[in-house]
Image (cartoon, rainbow, N blue to C red):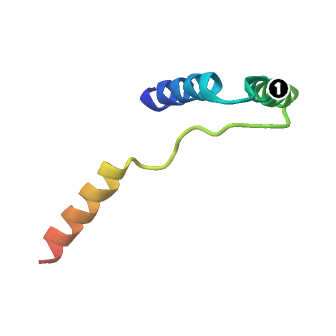
Amino acid sequence: MAILDDLKKTLTDFSSGTADPEDLERLQQFLKQMKDAGIAKTREYDIPQPDTIGRAMVDARRKAT
């Protein structure tokens, strides 16, 4: 959940620093409405973390030598 927490913090920081926070709020409400209507969908994070990819590559290279 660290990624989700980072995203929430980024959105909070952005909205306080942007020249038009009302526009950001309007876009967030639009996205929520589209999700509620089933039009917009979010996916679960299914890409391996970089350290997982790197570890597999290093292990494969060690086995090859």
Picture layout, residue 40 above or below residue 49: above
Q: Residue furthest front?
A: 19
Relative horizontal placement of residue 45, taking residue 22 as reference (left or right): left
* Residue at the image point whose x is 60% and y is 27% from the top: 17
* Residue at the image point whose x is 51% and y is 24% from the top: 9
Residue 24 occupies quadrant: top right
Q: Which residue is mark 1?
A: 26
Residue 30 location (% of width, % of height): 84, 29
Camera-side residue of 19 and 50: 19
Residue 22 location (% of width, % of height): 79, 23
Q: Residues within 10 Å of mark 1 (few under 14, many from 20)?
A: few
Q: Residue furthest bottom?
A: 65
Residue 65 location (% of width, % of height): 11, 78
- Secondary structure, mark 1, is helix
Residue 7 occupies quadrant: top right
Camera-side residue of 31 and 64: 31
* Residue at the image point whose x is 24% and y is 55% from the top: 55
Residue 64 occupies quadrant: bottom left
Residue 50 location (% of width, % of height): 36, 51
Amino acid at pointer 1: Arg
